[in-house]
Amino acid sequence: MVLIGLEYWRRGLVVFGLGTGFAAVLRATLPERRQGLLRVRSRWFDVSALAVAAVAILVVAWGISPLGTK
């Protein structure tokens, strides 16, 4: 959020997208007792939702033209 606030929004989105992807990997691999707040619904739904969100964020970050942006 600091990167986005400092007008490095593309870098901030990449960091945010990678973090969301990492959360999907953690949700898929951690045992039930270690998942904490990552555990919201069923495992397949959480992993799918996090993975789709990560891909969407990264596509937006990499797909928008960099002209005039940092």
Image (cartoon, helix red, strand yellow):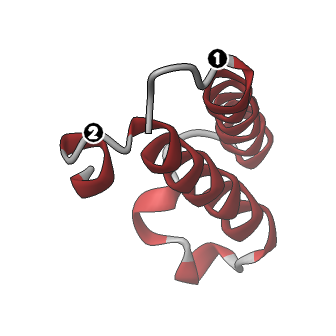
Residue reaching furthest to the front: 68
Q: Is residue 57 above or below residue 44?
A: above
Return the x and y of residue 31 as percentages of the image width and height: 71, 79
Residue at image point 49% right, 45% down: 40
Alpha-carbon distance for marks 2 and 1? 15 Å
Q: Mark 2 touching mark 1, by CB under 8 A?
A: no
Residue where numbered disc 2 is placed: 7
The kind of residue tagged 2 is Glu
Residue where numbered disc 1 is placed: 64
Q: Is residue 61 left or right of residue 8?
A: right
Count of marks overlaid on the render: 2
Secondary structure type for disc 2: loop
- Quarter of the image containing the C terminus? top left
Q: Quadrant of residue 50?
A: top right
**Pick the front one: 64 or 56:** 64
Q: Is residue 11 left or right of residue 5?
A: right
Residue at image point 43% right, 48% down: 12
First of labels 2, 1 by sequence position: 2
The kind of residue tagged 1 is Ile
Residue at image point 61% right, 31% down: 61
Return the x and y of residue 24 as percentages of the image width and height: 70, 54
Q: Quadrant of residue 47?
A: top right
Return the x and y of residue 38 as percentages of the image width and height: 50, 58
Q: Is residue 26 above or below residue 3?
A: below
Crowding at dot 1, Cα within 10 Å, few <14 / some 14-19 / many 20+, comes out as few
Crowding at dot 2, Cα within 10 Å, few <14 / some 14-19 / many 20+, comes out as few
**Pick the front one: 64 or 59:** 64
Residue at image point 67% right, 31% down: 49
**Pick the front one: 23 or 35:** 23
Secondary structure type for disc 1: loop
Return the x and y of residue 27 as percentages of the image width and height: 68, 62
